[in-house]
Image (spheres, helix red, strand yellow):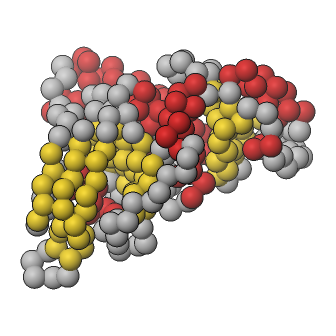
Amino acid sequence: MLRLTEVSKRYGRGSWVLRDVDLDIPDGEVLAITGANGSGKSTLLRILVGVARPTRGTVSGRPEVIGFVPDRFSPHERLSAMAYLTHMGRIRGLSTGTAATRAGELVDRLALVGGRTAPLRTLSKGNAQKVALAQALLVAPRLLVLDEPWSGLDTSAHGVLSEIIRDVADAGGAVVFTEHHESIIAAQASRTYAVDGAEKAASPDQPDQPARRRQAATVVLTEPAAGNRPQHTDWSALEGVDEVVEHDSAVTILVAPGSCDALLRTALRRGWSVDSVRRAGEPSEVR
């Protein structure tokens, strides 16, 4: 278990950025760090992964393999995405062949615009974010730390990121992320922690949420590229729906496996397009 005990941080003689953070993060948990802008969320994440050291307090139980996606990843390299990821894989102990294979799988899964040969310096913010996410997953992390990872991602990548978070947690790894949108936090996190030191109380059913998510299917629906807009639907009112996250022109729905087919029929009747379906226990999307 990763444990922070009375962790505080300030730079030089300046004001305290963090004060007396006590936090336990067990294996398999998905934890959302909340707080206002400038409250120290990013600093806390950097301390979690070991990039920054606390001024006071201790961090124990940090796993050997950590994946970290910072809030800014803007490489100006002439390297292609594949060359960069292969190089990072070798740094992390993979052979060249294994690193290249793993990098290719991640680039394809995240649907990097421009493909494997896209130079890093030509990437948009969203596609640079995909490369940042890929480098964090080259070796299966026991701790995955994400600083506002949904920022800039296209709608299709939102569903993939949700799957990745679930994959890491299902494999026994801990996931910690920051995010401003309450709907995303509610759909993804099993617990929240406010960086002012006041841990938010869980509702009675929150401890069971990770188990429900492991059993659920993930459905990503999008508005058609052309034609009439689909009918608005209260997805949460449908039988078997556990969580709903709406983003731009897409919606991601976690639904009980036995209710998945009925939900898909409803979506198609009301004019929605099915982007992807991942049923419980499947390692990848069914398109």
Q: Position of residue 14 (x, y in %)?
A: 15, 82
* 225 displayed left or right of 189: right
Residue 141 image-quadrant placement = top left
- Furthest residue toward front: 204
The residue positioned 75% from the left and 44% from the top of the image is 236
- Furthest residue toward bottom: 14
State the quadrant of the C terminus.
top right
The residue positioned 25% from the left and 58% from the top of the image is 22
* 35 displayed left or right of 7: right
Q: Is residue 177 visible?
A: yes
Q: Nearer the viewer, residue 190 or 264?
A: 190
The residue positioned 47% from the left and 57% from the top of the image is 201
Q: Nearer the viewer, residue 150 or 43?
A: 43
Residue 33 image-quadrant placement = bottom left
Q: Position of residue 205 (x, y in %)?
A: 57, 43
Number of dots carrying numbers: 0
Q: Position of residue 233 (x, y in %)?
A: 83, 46
Q: Nearer the viewer, residue 212 or 274?
A: 212
State the quadrant of the N terminus.
top left
The residue positioned 37% from the left and 54% from the top of the image is 147
Q: Position of residue 15 (x, y in %)?
A: 20, 82
* Image height of 258 relative to 178, above or below: above
Q: Is residue 135 visible?
A: no
* Image height of 271 relative to 42, above or below: above
